[in-house]
Amino acid sequence: MGLRTIAEADLSSIMEDDVCGFGWPIIVTDPNGVTVDTLKGLSDDIGAVVDPDTGQLVSGRLASVALRISSLASAGLGIPEGIADETKKPWVIEFDDINGNAHTFKVIESNPDRALGVVTCLLGSYKA
């Protein structure tokens, strides 16, 4: 077994273990309306971003999730992607913050790492 295979298997305990690891419940809905509410992954939602023009820290919102590609496939989903066409349904991501408040986002950018087997999705605000 090569190091890549071992690293992908290790992702399970790091990203999906919600007892001893960093796993957090994440709900994913694809553009066809298929919802999977059993996924675990990494999530963040912070209130500061760096202004690309000045390099200064400014108030804003930056949210993302990281999910194992193999877990998405096992759940019958593909790799989420940003859909720029506002007339089409986006990939929708939902998760609670640390205080139990639910938040709903759409995927605006997807960055799959097919060597390691993880996809990081940058998220934007979304209201159905």
Image (spheres, rainbow, N blue to C red):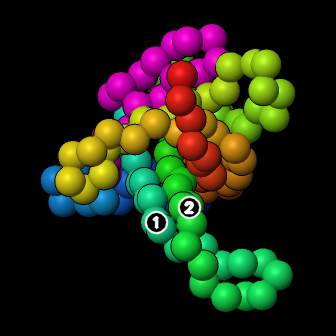
Q: Is residue 49 visible?
A: yes
Q: Position of residue 85 (x, y in %)?
A: 83, 27
* Residue 31 image-quadrant placement: top right
* Up-down relation of residue 42 to residue 108 (above or below): below
Q: Amino acid at mark 2?
A: Leu
* Residue 26 image-quadrant placement: top left
74 or 84: which is nearer to us? Answer: 84
Q: Position of residue 37 (x, y in %)?
A: 36, 25
Residue in view at x 71 percent, y 47 percent? 109
Q: Quadrant of the C terminus?
A: top right
How many residues crowd mark 2 within 10 Å: few (<14), some (14–19), many (20+)?
Answer: some
Q: Are marks 2 and 1 in contact (CB under 8 Å)?
A: yes
Measure the C-alpha gap from mark 2 to mark 1.
5 Å
* Up-down relation of residue 27 to residue 109 (above or below): above
Q: Position of residue 6 (x, y in %)?
A: 48, 58
- For the stretch drawn in magenta, the main secondary structure is strand
Residue that mark 2 sits on: 62
On the rendered structure, is 22 left or right of 114?
left
38 or 9: which is nearer to us? Answer: 38
* Residue 86 image-quadrant placement: top right
Local secondary structure at mark 1: strand
Report the span colored magenta. Answer: 23-38
* Up-down relation of residue 94 to residue 56 (above or below): above
Residue that mark 1 sits on: 46
Q: Earlier in the sequence, mark 2 or mark 1?
A: 1
5 or 18: which is nearer to us? Answer: 18
Q: Amino acid at mark 1?
A: Ile
